[in-house]
Image (cartoon, rainbow, N blue to C red):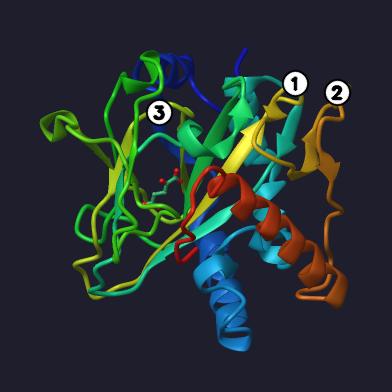
């Protein structure tokens, strides 16, 4: 018995390496959520930009509530089971008519979480379309081993190292448009990316990157997790508290440490640090 996905959606995830759209939040709920995020951006402009886009769920209650929403966790449970740790988040915002893009990559290549018993959720905060740069997936690419990536550090690339899988057959790409409040789930090894925002509206996505089974280790460094559901009998990671007040001194310090640890993981083995 699945909790949120239909059996067909569960099978699609296994076959294709991603599933979408999954309805989670109503349009009214998302309007409130978006207003709260944009109010936070206006109040703390530096905190949600550049490297500040990472792990903002540790400092903003609105993003904490999304991360622990039971409807969303039901969908995650249908993929990785009922013991779930939340291991990080990233706000991916593309401003109107902007050149930022995300090159073809596999999340598992640089993120150090082994084995690949984890899944990334991506929640549309705004309308997300082909025109404004929705994600594109290469179905079935998760079934092959990890590919070599080239670190391009491209100026407009929104990924830390501009990591890129070369020679992707783009004719196979499937766009993943989402309405506000809809979620996609994707596998650690699926090849995916996204183009620039060619529209007059902001494209706002919240990547829940990622939900992991407690048995998953971090082989490139250390990371904070929060217990999202079930039990953790392994205790491989540092437990982060949930927050109630936005941008409290404790929350800001905790997030800074989480982002430092994340940066150490992403740049492990590199002699160059990118923008994020
Ligand atoms: O926001 C995007 O366009 C891509 C995000 C991404 O690569 C991810 O969540 O794994």
Q: On the image, numbered disc 3 is attached to which residue?
A: 18
Q: Provide the secondary structure element on which disc 3 rests.
A: strand
For label 3, the crowd category at 10 Å Cα-Cα, with few meaning under 14, some 14 to 19 and many 20 or more, is many
Q: Position of residue 228 (x, y in %)?
A: 77, 39
Instruction: Please state which of residues 92 and 51 is positioned toward the viewer in this rendering.
Output: 51
Q: Provide the secondary structure element on which disc 1 rests.
A: loop
Instruction: Please state which of residues 220 and 186 is positioned toward the viewer in this rendering.
Output: 220
Q: Is residue 199 left or right of residue 117?
A: left
- Quadrant the N terminus occupies: top right
Alpha-carbon distance for marks 3 and 2? Answer: 27 Å
Q: On the image, numbered disc 2 is attached to which residue?
A: 234
For label 1, the crowd category at 10 Å Cα-Cα, with few meaning under 14, some 14 to 19 and many 20 or more, is some
Q: Provide the secondary structure element on which disc 2 rests.
A: loop
Q: Are marks 1 and 2 in contact (CB under 8 Å)?
A: yes
Q: Earlier in the sequence, mark 3 or mark 1?
A: 3
For label 2, the crowd category at 10 Å Cα-Cα, with few meaning under 14, some 14 to 19 and many 20 or more, is few
Q: Position of residue 251 (x, y in %)?
A: 81, 68
Q: Determine the image quadrant of residue 214.
A: top right
Q: Position of residue 237 (x, y in %)?
A: 81, 37
Numbered label tally? 3
Q: Is residue 31 above or below residue 206?
A: below
Q: Which mark is residue 215?
A: 1
Instruction: Please state which of residues 256 and 9 is positioned toward the viewer in this rendering.
Output: 256
Q: Residue at 70% across / 25% down in the picture?
A: 216
Q: Is residue 266 visible?
A: yes
């Amino acid at each position: 018995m699945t909790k949120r996905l239909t059996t067909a959606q569960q099978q699609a995830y296994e076959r294709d390496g991603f599933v979408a759209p999954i309805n989670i939040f109503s349009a009214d709920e998302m309007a409130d959520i978006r207003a709260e995020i944009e109010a936070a951006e206006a109040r703390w402009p530096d905190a949600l930009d550049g490297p500040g886009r990472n792990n903002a769920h540790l400092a903003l209650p609105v993003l904490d509530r999304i991360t622990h929403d039971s409807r969303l966790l039901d969908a995650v449970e249908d993929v990785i089971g009922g013991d779930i740790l939340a291991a990080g988040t990233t706000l991916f915002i593309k401003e109107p008519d902007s050149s930022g893009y995300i090159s073809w990559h596999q999340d598992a290549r640089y993120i150090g979480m082994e084995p690949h018993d984890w899944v990334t959720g991506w929640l549309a905060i705004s309308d997300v379309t082909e025109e404004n740069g929705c994600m594109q997936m290469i179905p079935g690419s998760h079934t092959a081993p990890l590919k070599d990536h080239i670190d391009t550090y491209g100026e407009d690339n929104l990924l830390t190292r501009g990591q890129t899988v070369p020679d992707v057959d783009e004719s196979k790409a499937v766009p993943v448009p989402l309405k506000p409040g809809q979620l996609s789930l994707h596998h650690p090894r699926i090849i995916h990316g996204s183009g620039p925002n060619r529209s007059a509206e902001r494209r706002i996505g919240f990547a829940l990157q990622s939900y992991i089974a407690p048995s998953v280790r971090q082989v490139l460094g250390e990371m904070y997790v929060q217990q999202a559901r079930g039990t953790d009998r392994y205790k491989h990671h540092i437990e982060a508290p949930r927050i109630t007040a936005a941008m409290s001194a404790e929350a800001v310090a905790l997030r800074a440490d989480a982002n430092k640890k994340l940066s150490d993981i992403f740049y492990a083995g590199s002699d160059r640090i990118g923008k994020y």
